[in-house]
């Protein structure tokens, strides 16, 4: 098994407004940093490396009933991108995309027990992901620690009490 991966967000923006007697304009493509971000991971573990990929099946999207939640056990995920069970010790990339047709927000993070803190800062911290929105956290360093049995549950919850929501998850991590 091997994994070579990178995160290269594409930011586009064309900004203009009337200024003085003319028009001032700026293209984000001119920005030396945001136009060139490419965070790459080599196969393996440690700083700048990852060897595990978990991604939801685009043909069988996960759905949460009204007010429901799921706790993904990062130290015992079933069915990675090729159908194998995986155990993450570190998370390097965490991405959650809320389906644009959702009528409610997703709430991510803050599992009741054994919470994966990761990029959230504390076990009780959560993030709202609105319909069509994307939560993305990337660390090219050593990664966010996953502690089996005490810090390994990543919660995804339906913030609404009326209808179901669907979502996509991508997690890149390492076995050590």
Image: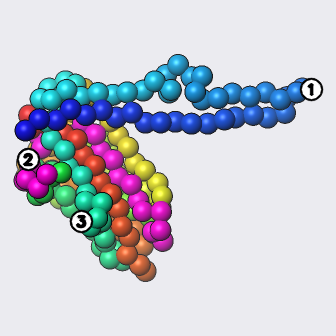
Rate crowding at label 3 as few (under 14), some (14 to 19) or many (20 or more) other CA atoms within 10 Å: some
Residue that label 1 marks: 21
- CA–CA distance in space, label 3 to label 2: 18 Å
Compare residues 60 and 24 and report the one nearer the observer: 60
Q: Residue at x 75, y 34 (%)?
A: 16
Instruction: Give percent across and percent down for residue 9.
Output: 43, 36
Q: Name the mark nearer the viewer: 1 or 3.
A: 1
Q: Secondary structure at mark 3?
A: strand
User: What segment is highlighted magenta in the picture?
Assistant: 82-104
Q: Secondary structure at mark 1?
A: loop
Q: Quadrant location of residue 93?
A: top left
Q: Position of residue 71 (x, y in %)?
A: 21, 61
Name the residue nearer the viewer: 2 or 37.
2
Label 3: which residue? 70
Residue furthest toward the bottom? 162
Q: Count numbered badges in the picture.
A: 3
In the image, is residue 129 above or below residue 12? below
For marks 3 and 2, the one nearer the N-term is: 3
Q: Secondary structure at mark 2?
A: loop
- The quarter in which the N terminus is drawn is top left
Category of crowding for the residue at label 1, using alpha-carbon neighbours closer than 10 angstroms: few (below 14), some (14–19), many (at least 20): few
Left or right of residue 73, residue 70 in this image = right
Dot placed on the residue nearer the N-terminal end, 2 or 1: 1
In terms of secondary structure, what is the magenta stretch mainly? Answer: loop
Q: Which mark is residue 87?
A: 2
């Amino acid at each position: 098994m091997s994994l070579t991966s990178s995160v290269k967000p594409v930011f586009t923006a064309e900004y203009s407004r009337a200024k003085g007697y003319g028009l001032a304009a700026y293209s984000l493509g001119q920005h030396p940093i945001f136009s060139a971000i490419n965070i790459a991971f080599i196969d393996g573990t440690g700083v700048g490396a990852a060897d595990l990929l978990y991604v939801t099946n685009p043909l069988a999207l996960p759905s949460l009933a009204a007010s429901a939640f799921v706790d993904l056990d990062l130290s015992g995920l079933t069915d990675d991108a090729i159908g194998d069970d995986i155990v993450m010790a570190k998370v390097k990339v965490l991405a959650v995309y809320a389906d644009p047709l959702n009528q409610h927000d997703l709430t991510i993070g803050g599992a009741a027990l054994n919470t994966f803190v990761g990029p959230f800062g504390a076990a009780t911290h959560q993030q709202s992901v609105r319909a069509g929105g994307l939560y993305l956290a990337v660390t090219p360093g050593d990664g966010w620690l996953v502690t089996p049995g005490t810090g390994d549950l990543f919660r995804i919850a339906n913030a609404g009490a009326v209808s179901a929501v669907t979502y996509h998850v991508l997690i890149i991590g390492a076995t050590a």
